[in-house]
Amino acid sequence: MVVKVFLTVISEPGRIKEVFTSLKSFDEVDFVCIVDSGPYDIVALVEVDTLDGYRVLIEKVAALPNTEDFESFITVDKRHHLG
């Protein structure tokens, strides 16, 4: 099972590029971009093989320097969506 997650990050002021570079280096991160405006500084699309892999990723993100806060959103495969 592939677990796809949207990850949003708020970096410390002036530290967006450092956080972006760190996230980009993670094997689990398929796509990452800096947001021009809005409540988040960075949005990333992440794929992991299991929910345990997701937990490991979240621990890595929580340990990143220069990160104030983050949220993650696990997606649901449309083939399993009700409706």
Image: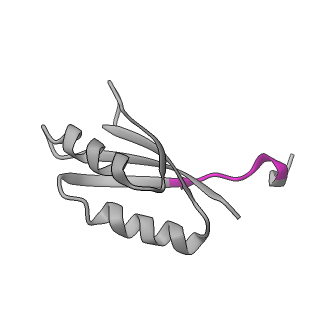
Q: Residue 76's x, y, as percent?
A: 70, 53
Q: Is residue 74 magenta?
A: yes
| Residue depicted at x 45% and y 49% | 7
Residue reaching furthest to the top: 36
Please tell me which residue lies in front, 37 or 42: 42
Instruction: Tell me the magenta residue range.
Output: 73-79
| Quadrant assignment, res 10 | top left
Which quadrant is the N terminus positioned in?
bottom right
> Eyeballing the image, is 54 above or below 30?
below
Q: Residue 22's x, y, as percent?
A: 28, 50
Q: Is residue 16 magenta?
A: no
Please tell me which residue lies in front, 59 or 26: 26
**Badge count:** 0
| Quadrant assignment, res 74 | bottom right
| Residue depicted at x 47% and y 54% | 72
Q: Residue 56's x, y, as percent?
A: 44, 71
> Eyeballing the image, is 53 above or below 31?
below
| Residue depicted at x 22% and y 38% | 17
Residue reaching furthest to the right: 83
Left or right, 58 with respect to 17, comes to right
